[in-house]
Amino acid sequence: MHYINTCTIVISIHIFNHINCTSKNIQIFHQLERQLITMEIELVSRETIKPSSPTPSHLKIYPLSFIDNIYFSNYVPLLYFYNPNKSMDQNSKISQLRKSLSQILSKYYHFAGRIKDKTTIECNDQGVLFLVTKVNNKLSEIPQNPTEKLLNPLFPDELQWKEMEWRTSFIAIQINCFACGGMVISICISHKLGDASTIFNFMNDWAIINQKFEEDKKELLVSPLSLLDAGATIFPQRDLPIFPEMVLKRENNVVFKRFVFKPEMIKSLKAMVTSSSMHTPTRVQVVIAWIYKHAVSIMGLNFRTAMFSMIVDLRRRMVPPLSEHCVGNIIWFSYMLANKKEMELDELVCKIKEGLSECCNVYPKLFREKENNNISECLKQVTQPFPENLFTFSSWCRFPMYKADFGWGKPTWITTTCCSSRNIIFLMDTRDGDGIEALVNMEEKYMAKFEHDFELLQYASFNPNNARYDVIPSKL
């Protein structure tokens, strides 16, 4: 069984022979060549991986928290790129990945279960999807021009950002084996199971088990099982009303682009803010403010009509702080309420920080006190239909995303793809940990203006190669 993904028709080399061989024309030709990559993918195998040991009877029903219950069930997609490694061939790597995945699923036992009802998971050890493909390309061809057409076939069953169907697998994994020996591990994991921190911790724990698989199995337990039900323990559903899930509205006219903020550019943006005020922004805050300011401008909106929200990780903000290994959706929303139509960058940063401070002062205490009426009102508000001009930022920066070493080196690049929902922006670390890669989802008509905004591009590069300037060698 196989399928072939043809992104474009490859240019015939004789066309190049008729072009004047100036340096500019050669550069144009190579740009076209990168855009016209043909990628062929063959599906080698498809199976279900089940936990290595059965879930104990007293753990068969896993309660979801009230935050899990309102969160959309769409699959969050991630791609992990790994350079070729001569220490182990691809077949051996795949065999070991199967075994270690089975082991980790016995620890994250509810990940291998199925939805039972609106508030619980049945931990029935049904397992997760596991696909293997053969890609007749070099790994380096993808980061050179990481378009949706090149990235999307690397995901299993086209599940990226799609809504999970009733009683289907929470997780689907695809191991893509490239002709050069490199690999891309893709995972699509339902947001019902947890947030970005949960996903990265799962991948890191799987990697640790894969490394230690041949060692004493007593060393394989990477996280205490008590952390798995942390979300439901801290945010129990109890007798709260069951509100409808939030909906991730997907639209055909939405595209996404990558904008890379190098460390020196972030430093310049921070200097721009601190020179005119007493506020010291984080690199994430200043990048968010910069993107938000220019997006509002090119859409012809103002800061009163363009609403702002940011997803906040509550783990270290709870009192007492929670472990970073807590599983579930332990997140809430911070909002910025603008008091005027136009604002400078330092004013935006100030407002973003005020919204974050209010969020962290109010919700951790409110959720800890478990006052049903107040919690119900919060749940009701966030499950209302999203306003038309809402901008939502989700920062995955500072999560340990580049720690997933399965035994053949750390990933050279981690990314996601278009969620087809307007005005959602993801921020991710570049591999060095100092730069930021912003993935902006926007209506096509606005993106055409946004990606050519002169002032924006003074601090952010649209060239996707810049995200990996020290990551993937061109010789691969």
Image (cartoon, helix red, strand yellow):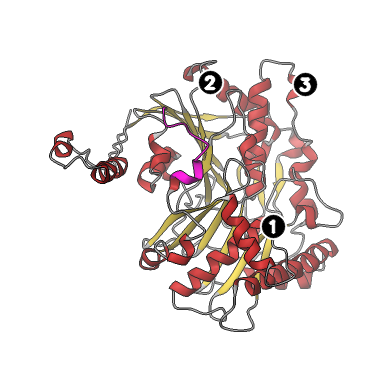
- Look at discs 1 and 3 and give the one toward the viewer: 1
Circle 2 is placed at which residue position? Answer: 93
Q: Indicate the amino acid at tag 1.
A: Ile
Which residue is at a point 48% across and 64% down the rendered structure image? 456
Q: Secondary structure at mark 1?
A: strand
The span picked out in magenta is 465-475
Residue 447: image quadrant is bottom left
Q: Which residue is mark 3?
A: 218
Which residue is drawn at the image coordinates 60% and 28% (left, top)?
Answer: 101
Residue at point 77%, 72% (across, down): 374
Tell me which label, 2 or 3, sits earlier in the chain: 2
**Residue in front for this viewpoint, 58 or 136:** 136
The kind of residue tagged 2 is: Lys
Indicate which label's residue lies in the foreground, 2 or 3: 2
Question: Which badge, 1 or 3, is on the more N-terminal residue?
Answer: 3
Circle number at residue 331: 1
Tell me the crowding category of disc 2: few under 14, some 14 to 19, or many 20 or more residues within 10 angstroms, Cα based. some
In the shown orientation, is residue 68 left or right of residue 57? Answer: left
The residue at the point 71 percent across, 68 percent down is: 353
The image shows residue 314, relative to residue 102, as above or below, that is below
The numbered disc on residue 457 is none
Among numbered discs 2 and 1, the one appearing first in the sequence: 2
Q: Is residue 64 magenta?
A: no
Vertical relation: 64 (above or below) 411: below
